[in-house]
Amino acid sequence: MKIATIIVRVLIGLLLLFASISFFFKLAPEPETTGNFKAFNMGLVASTYLLPLAKTVELLCGLSFVTGRFVTLANILILPITINILFINYFLTPEGLPIAGLLFLGNLFLIYRYWDNYKTVFTP
């Protein structure tokens, strides 16, 4: 189980690093968006701070997952972002749903594996 944890942790970390680095350095062209997702994306871009904030959190959590340090904190920080990625893909761009689902399930798996670190949060 320890090897599976390391594999999932590193794969999620690499995915988050790739997404954030390609956003900041404009490594890939912006995909063509249409319909409701285009309106949603225009709102995110218009906010001027939300996308850079989310991508910065992705970068920091990706580094944490790849290095194996502060993984417990990174799991909590990245959980709302993975939930949003899942919902955005479910409601607006279903073609990306498999990767979003795997990212969310991987995050849940890591929370399960590091559950002993979270026990004190849920005790009175």
Image: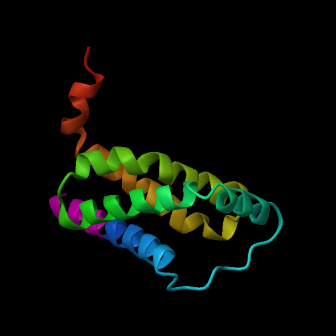
Q: Is residue 67 above or below residue 74?
A: below
From the top left corner, tell me how far across and down residue 63 is, in percent: 27, 65
With 28 as the anchor, is 102 left or right in this view?
left
Report the front residue among 61 and 119. 61
With 71 as the anchor, is 105 left or right in this view?
right
- Dividing the picture into quadrants, the one containing residue 62 is bottom left
From the top left corner, tell me how far across and down residue 8 is, in percent: 30, 64
From the top left corner, tell me how far across and down residue 35 is, in percent: 83, 66
Residue furthest to the top: 124
Residue depicted at x 80% and y 71%: 34
Magenta-span inclusion, residue 42 = no
Report the front residue among 46 and 73. 46
Q: Quadrant of the N terminus?
A: bottom left
Residue depicted at x 77% and y 66%: 38
Q: Main secondary structure of the magenta part?
A: helix
Q: How is the image coloured?
A: rainbow
From the top left corner, tell me how far across and down residue 92 is, in percent: 73, 60
- Dividing the picture into quadrants, the one containing residue 13 is bottom left
Residue furthest to the front: 48
Q: Which residues are magenta?
A: 1-10
Count numbered badges in the picture.
0
Residue depicted at x 40% and y 67%: 16
Residue depicted at x 23% and y 29%: 119
